């Protein structure tokens, strides 16, 4: 099996991350034991049952099919998370800017 380089990016919660291999499928940590991380789809709460594991030998391996095909795969998810993080950061600072100004300034890709 080919080792997949796993990308780790922040969610909108500080200290929380999602994982992916640039194929449009994104996961949060579900549990972890003995060097293996068990992952579930970021849309788990919305009913998607996609799962994967990450271990030191194979990297990220998809183990269960994603069941919300209207949500997965989603190639824009990392950009959407980055935009959400930027907006939340702006909203938590004490500057005077309207939400429209923040949205316009932060959505520049
Ligand atoms: Zn999914």
Image (cartoon, rainbow, N blue to C red):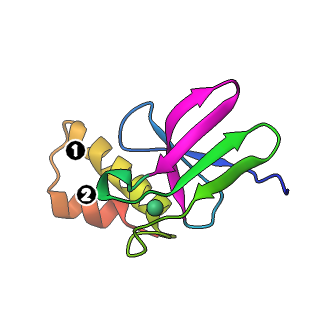
Q: Position of residue 76 (x, y in %)?
A: 47, 68
Which of the 4 image quadrants contains residue 82? bottom left
* Mark 1 crowdedness (10 Å alpha carbons): few <14, some 14-19, many ≥20: some
> Any magenta on residue 40?
yes
Disc marking residue 15 = none
* Mark 2 crowdedness (10 Å alpha carbons): few <14, some 14-19, many ≥20: some
**Left or right, residue 61 beside residue 46:** right
- Determine the main secondary structure of the stretch shown in magenta: strand
> Any magenta on residue 39?
yes
Please, which residue is most extreme toward the bottom here?
70
Q: Nearer the viewer, residue 39 or 11?
A: 39
Disc marking residue 91 = 1
Q: Tell me, yes or no, whether the two marked residues, 2 and 1, touch with CB atoms within 8 Å.
A: yes
| Mark 1 close to ligand 1, CB under 8 Å | no
Q: Helix, strand or loop at disc 2?
A: helix
| Mark 2 close to ligand 1, CB under 8 Å | no
Q: Residue at x 62, y 67 (%)?
A: 23
Which of the 4 image quadrants contains residue 92? top left
Q: Position of residue 58 (x, y in %)?
A: 79, 47
Which of the 4 image quadrants contains residue 2? bottom right
Does 100 appear above or below 54? below
**Left or right, residue 68 beside residue 97:** right
Q: Residue at x 60, y 50 (%)?
A: 52
Q: Which residues are magenta?
A: 25-41
């Amino acid at each position: 099996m080919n080792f997949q380089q796993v990308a780790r990016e922040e969610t909108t919660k500080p200290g929380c991350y999602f994982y992916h291999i640039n194929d449009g499928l994104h996961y949060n940590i579900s549990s972890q034991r003995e060097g293996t991380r068990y992952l579930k789809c970021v849309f788990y709460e919305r009913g998607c049952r996609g799962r994967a594991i990450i271990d030191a030998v194979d990297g990220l391996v998809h183990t269960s099919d994603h069941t919300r095909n209207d949500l997965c795969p989603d190639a824009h998810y990392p950009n959407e998370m980055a935009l959400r993080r930027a907006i939340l950061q702006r909203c938590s600072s004490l500057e005077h800017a309207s939400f429209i100004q923040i949205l316009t300034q932060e959505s520049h890709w």
